[in-house]
Amino acid sequence: MPKVSAVMALYNTPYNYLKATVESLLNQTFSDFELIIIDDASNMDYEEFFANLNDERIKYSKLEKNAGPGHARNVGIRQAAGEYVAICDSDDIYLPKRFELQAKFFDENPDISLTSCTFRFSNRSKISHFPLNDKDIKAFMLFNSPLSNPAIMFRKNVFIENNLFYPEDTNFAEDYELWINAMFCRIKIANLKECLMIYTRRAGQLSKAKQETQIEMLKKLYKKILSHIGLDASQEQLDLHYNIYTGNFEQISSPDVISDWFDKIIEHNNGLLDEETLEENKKQTLDKYNKIKNRLFKIKIGANNLCLGKNLRLYIEQRD
C-alpha cells in the first residue's frame, strides 16, 4: 500500500501541459505513491498517452459523464489506498520535494491533518504569501482560501471519518468550501513555507458575467462561515465583507465601518477563530484603508508602487 495517493482530476488539458505536470510528479524524490487520474469525460483521448509512460504507479480511469472537478476528485479520493492524499492539477509543475516534505511534515506533526504550501505563478518570480499556522489560516478563511488547492495534502482517514469531500454542485470555490467545512470540524491546518509548486497561468480572461457569478458564490460562502459564528449577515454586510477583502475601500464610507464590522465578528466568535489574530487583522485592514485614502495616485514599478500622498510626498509601497 503506498504512503501517498496523488489524485488528479483531468478534463481536456493540452498534452504539452499534461506531459510536463505528470513528469514533474513521476520525478518526485519521494517515490512511495500512486497517481490516480480521473478523466472527467474529456473529449480528448489520453489512453495511449498514459500507456506510453509505462509507469505502474499511474492508475487512469475515465468517467462516462462529465460531472465537474469536485466529483472527479471525490472519485479519486475514494479510490485512494494511501495514508495521505495529495491533490494535483493537470497543468501545474510540482517541484521535486513536494511529496517528500509534505509527507515528512505529517509524520512529524500528527495533530495536523490538512496542509498546502507556498507557490509561484509561471509568469512571475514572486512567491505567494499565505499564513503558515492554524490560527492565522483560520482567521484568513473569513475572507478567502489561504490554501493552494493544487498543492493540498490531507490525512485520508480524518477526512473520511468527518465525511469531508469536495462539493459537487459548483465549479468555483469548491475547495474553499471544503476547507471551511474542515475548519468547522476543528481540523488543524498548516502551510509549508517552502515553495513546492509552479502554478500555470494560461492566456485568457474571465468574462464579466462569470466574474459576477463567482463574486456572488464567494458571498454565499461568507454567509455560511459567518452564520457558523452566530452572525446572520445581511446583503449589505456581505458586500462590506467582500470590499474589505478586495481592498475596494472606495465603497466604504469611513474606517469606523470597518472597525465596527470586525468588532461584531469578534463579539460573535465562539472560539473557532483566534481573537488576537482577528484584532491584528482589523488593525492591518485599518492601516491599509488609511494608507489608500491618503494616497493621491500610484504608478506601478516592478513589484512596487510609486505613490504620491496627500501631503505631496513621494513614497515606495510594496504591492501584495
Image (cartoon, rainbow, N blue to C red):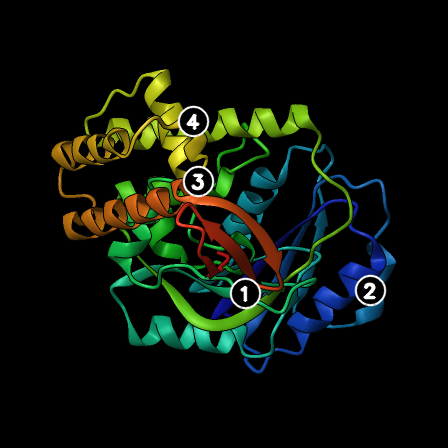
Q: Where does residue 309 sit, x and y in percent of width and height? A: 44, 49
Label 1, label 3: how many angstroms apart (C-alpha)?
23 Å
Q: Nearer the viewer, mark 1 or mark 3?
A: 3
Q: Is residue 171 above or below residue 32?
A: above
Q: Residues within 10 Å of mark 4 (few under 14, many from 20)?
A: few
Label 4, label 3: how many angstroms apart (C-alpha)?
9 Å
Amino acid carrying mark 1 in the image: Phe
Verify CB contact (< 8 Å) between mark 2 and mark 1: no
Amino acid carrying mark 4 in the image: Gln
Residue corresponding to mark 2: 51
Amino acid carrying mark 3 in the image: Gly
Label 3, label 2: how many angstroms apart (C-alpha)?
48 Å
Please state if 249 lies on the left or on the right of 113 as rendered: right
Q: Is residue 63 above or below residue 47?
A: above
Q: Which mark is residue 247?
A: 3
Q: Where does residue 312 sit, x and y in percent of width and height? A: 45, 51
* Residue at x 60% of width, y 74% of height: 95
* Circle 3: element type: loop
**Which of marks 1 and 4 precedes in the sequence?**
1
Residue corresponding to mark 4: 251
* Residue 186 appears in view: no
**Which of marks 1 and 2 precedes in the sequence?**
2
Label 2, label 1: how many angstroms apart (C-alpha)?
30 Å
Between 19 and 52, the residue placed more toward the observer is 19
